[in-house]
Image (cartoon, rainbow, N blue to C red):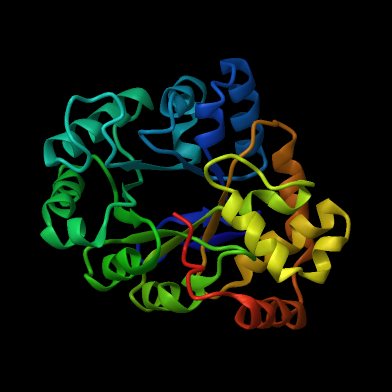
Amino acid sequence: MEKRLFGNTGMNVSVLGFGGAEIGFNMTDVGEVERLLGSALDAELNVIDTAECYNISEELIGRTVSHRRDEYYLFSKCGHASGFDLPDWDPKLLEQSIERSLFRMQTDYIDCVYLHTCSEEMLRRGEVIEVLQRAKERGLTRSIGYSGDHKAALYAVQCGAFDSLETSLSIADQEAIELTIPEAAKRGMGIVIKRPIANVVWKNSSRPTDPYTPVYWDRIQKLDYDFLKSDVKDSVATAINFTLSVPGVHTAIVGTTKPERWAENAKLLDQGLSEELYQAIRARWKAVAEPDWIGNA
């Protein structure tokens, strides 16, 4: 699997990374996770991304692949109380959350700790950033980042405090292509993409009811890309290759609970994407996207 130098961090990351939300929220069996993550690492994926609030995700990662710690880069996020009797974004909460993440994942360090979608106002106060900087100074994390979208993400990039940006980008979510990614790339930041295939929402015959994907469903109906009328596997290949073709992007995080999926995903990358199709997708977005189609945090 192709590797890309992750900004100025010195990490060489695989273009596909594993997203740990699904295994945590679905409370996937430990044996299944062991097969899932083992197959991902065997397929040369080397990025595992999770968060303190993804239910038991961090514990599952620690129990199944901590013995292979030198084979992957580990990213996690903090900010939400998730079991602590402290308010979100409290500096003490962040400190305790990072320590807990290390314990759960059975590791001495995290490769990047992200602030998890806090507001621009909270970022401007500076306290939350200082907690992450201290964690970096102590060696608890190699780098620090911001995970989020829209104006808060732009401030996070421009303030110069972070090594990495994790943000939304897909065929249904293109604000970052002009708003934040060029700025982040110019500053040598590592760029991670969340929801890079818009949850494959177009495979659904009716509007979803979960908290995240209805907004993508509505956008896809209006965008009405021609390539989405082809076989689902082909359309997914086009979608993921579009995301990875955006200049500055280093890795795209994809979640799954199916162990065989990683070999399949790696093959999708072989299809590539022509410049003509990339520009057609961009042109359709610019023609149809509405002003409130901002990054979907």
Rendering quarter of residue 288: bottom right
Using residue 115 as the reference point, say whether residue 132 is left or right of it. left
Quadrant showing the C terminus: bottom left
Considering only vertical position in the picture, is 121 above or below 180?
A: above
Residue nearer the viewer, 221 or 61 = 221
Depth check, front residue: 107 or 155: 155
Report the side of 38 relative to 85 (left or right): right
Q: How many marks on residues?
A: 0
Question: Residue at position x 38%, y 33% from top?
Answer: 53
Residue 144 seen from this side: yes
Residue at x-position 52% and y-position 22% = 64
Residue 242 pos. (x, y %): 67, 68
Q: Nearer the viewer, residue 248 or 4?
A: 248
The answer to whether 10 appears left or right of 241 in the picture is left
Residue 64 drawn above or below residue 156:
above
**In the image, residue 108 lies at what x, y percent?**
29, 32
Rendered residue at 38%/57% (across/down): 148
Q: Nearer the viewer, residue 179 or 35?
A: 179
Q: Quadrant of residue 161?
A: bottom left
Is residue 142 positioned above or below 188 on the image? above
Percent x, y of residue 145: 31, 55
At which x and y percent is residue 29?
Answer: 59, 16
Observer able to see residue 197: no
Residue 89 position by quadrant: top left
Q: Is residue 247 left or right of residue 147?
A: right
